[in-house]
Image (spheres, grey):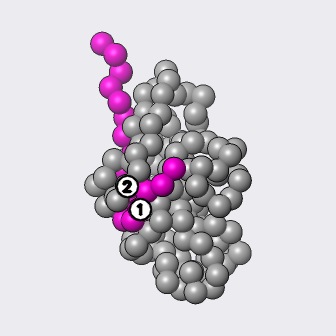
Amino acid sequence: FGKKDSKIVAQQTGKVVPITEVPDPVFSDKVLGDGIAIIPTSNTVVAPVSGTIAQVAHTFHAVGIEADDGTEVLVHLGIDTVKLNGEGFTCHVKVGDHVNAGDKLMDMDIEAIAAKGFQTISPCIITTMDDLKSMEGITGEATAGETTVITYKKK
């Protein structure tokens, strides 16, 4: 009767790396939560979980989703990309929308963002770690909306 593992799928296609490799201490030191990061090779950003859009940064560099099980997941696109004021991002969702894992959230012009000197590595983290019994990140190549990158158990 144990609770089954829940899963989070890749928000982008690319190389999955441990969160500790993100060149920003807010993420690498797990200040906001734990998870993985993806070095994207494609511009499409999809929902890593099914749930409700809880927040969309006005600069479109971050999306918060409350999963259907109550877990809060943050997708942060690139490092310091808040400074772009939305340039390079096209948002397809708004707060209150319900999404299914794999639904398109955003387009991120990774070439334009990199050309402006910003890193495109994109963390996907669980911000409600206190609600979890366990969490495991998976590394390697991932396909957006298909590859499981995090498994977790709630308390």
Q: Indicate the secondary structure of the residue bearing disc 2.
A: strand
Q: Residue at x 35, y 21 (%)?
A: 3
46 relative to 151, above or below: below
Work out how far the residue at label 2 is from the one at label 1, CA to CA, in angstroms: 6 Å
Q: Residue at x 34, y 58 (%)?
A: 142
Residue 15's label in the rendered image is 1
Residue 63 included in the magenta stretch of the image: no
Position of residue 58 measured from the top left corner of the image (x, y, whole percent):
64, 68
Q: Quadrant of residue 44?
A: bottom left
Residue 11 included in the magenta stretch of the image: yes
**Residue 83 visible in rendering:** yes
Q: Residue at x 63, y 76 (%)?
A: 118
Using the image as rendered, state which of residue 140 and residue 118 is in the foreground.
Answer: 140
Using the image as rendered, state which of residue 46 and residue 27 is in the foreground.
Answer: 27
Q: Quadrant of the N terminus?
A: top left
67 relative to 130, above or below: below
Amino acid type, callout 2: Gly
Which residues make up the magenta segment?
A: 1-18
Number of disc labels: 2
Position of residue 106 measured from the top left corner of the image (x, y, whole percent):
45, 69
Using the image as rendered, state which of residue 135 and residue 60 is in the foreground.
Answer: 135
Q: Indicate the secondary structure of the residue bearing disc 1.
A: strand
Using the image as rendered, state which of residue 3 and residue 119 is in the foreground.
Answer: 119
Q: Residue at x 43, y 56 (%)?
A: 16
**Which residue is tagged 2?**
140
CB atoms at circles 2 and 1 under 8 Å apart?
A: yes
Position of residue 53 measured from the top left corner of the image (x, y, whole percent):
50, 53
**Residue 58 visible in rendering:** no
69 relative to 118, above or below: above
Specify which label sits upstream in the sequence, 2 or 1.
Answer: 1
